[in-house]
Amino acid sequence: MATRHQRAAKAAGKTGDELGRLFAQMGTSQHPRGAVLSAYRTARKALKGNFSSLATVEDALGTLRLAVERANEILLRDATEIGLKQAETELAIYGLELMGGVGAQTRQEALRSIIATLEAQITQVRALALTGADEALVIGDASRVGLLSPAPVSAEASRWLALVAEQSHEEIIQDSIAQAGAGDEYMRQAIAAIDERTTDCCLRVHGQVVSLDGEFTLTGTPRFADRLHAPPFHWYCRTGIALVRRIDADDEWSQEMRDAARAELTAREETGQRVEIHPAHARSRR
């Protein structure tokens, strides 16, 4: 029978899987039909051959903004629910009462930031249209990507989706533990699913345990900083955080997770390759 630690780690791993699903719904190179990538394709198609028409440019940019905003409203709402479900699962595992709730402030901040990134693009596109610039500067051609690329907006959205999920999880966990007066009994553990997409950064932090208010030490790449309280640790980060009892911080399960991460790092160094791993989980290996 699975221990409480194993069940909590599994819940954190599921959050990582769910974040991967949201990234796919947004759109990635592996999932080009995602909502944000599709909106950009539609905008570029509308501009092709029509960049000299300011009315067409404004219409295409307005449609793009509306589509991106609507898509991210839904994705951010789903990210909140992902964090909430993980918190509910973990509290039930440890027999703690659910206290507190999830605020909408972070989600609103997230949407503003994502749209601000898009607006910066839109402003540049308008300026190029007004000066009669070559449309290839905006929509790209065989030799260049073009200014109107989804990459900046998608990257910013990926950061906020992970952040919103983790903050909605942590708000409830922290409030519930505080109400129970059990702050000294619990810690937090980074949980990554090990597969060919797992970054060097997340392999190296996998299994690391810190206090409830502590920071994870990051040594791999890519990473946003050397020390962070919680994910995302980099763009498109799928690492989750599990609630773990202090007495389980260095148990056999933790050692197996860390060993699996080290094994994957060693295999990549020796072969220079990443190999598909399925199914991906906290102790998966080639």
Image: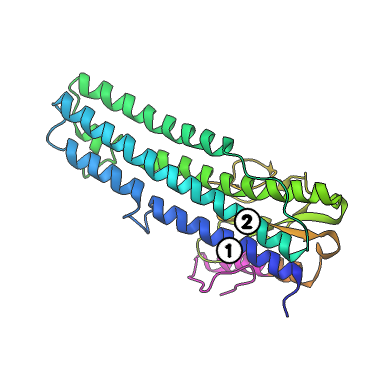
Q: How many marks?
A: 2
Q: Which mark is residue 226?
A: none
Element carrying mark 2: strand
Residue range highlighted in magenta: 260-286
Q: Does the magenta portion include 205?
A: no
Q: Indicate the position of residue 240 as horizontal and vertical percent values.
A: 62, 56
Give the image quarter of residue 139. Answer: top left
Colouring style: rainbow
What type is the residue that disc 1 sits on? Lys
Residue hosting label 2: 240
Q: Would you place residue 159 above or below residue 15 in this image?
A: above
What type is the residue that disc 2 sits on? Gly
**Mark 1 and mark 2 in contact (Cβ < 8 Å)?**
yes
Residue hosting label 1: 14
C-alpha span from label 2 to label 1: 8 Å
Q: Indicate the position of residue 137 as horizontal and vertical percent values.
A: 24, 32
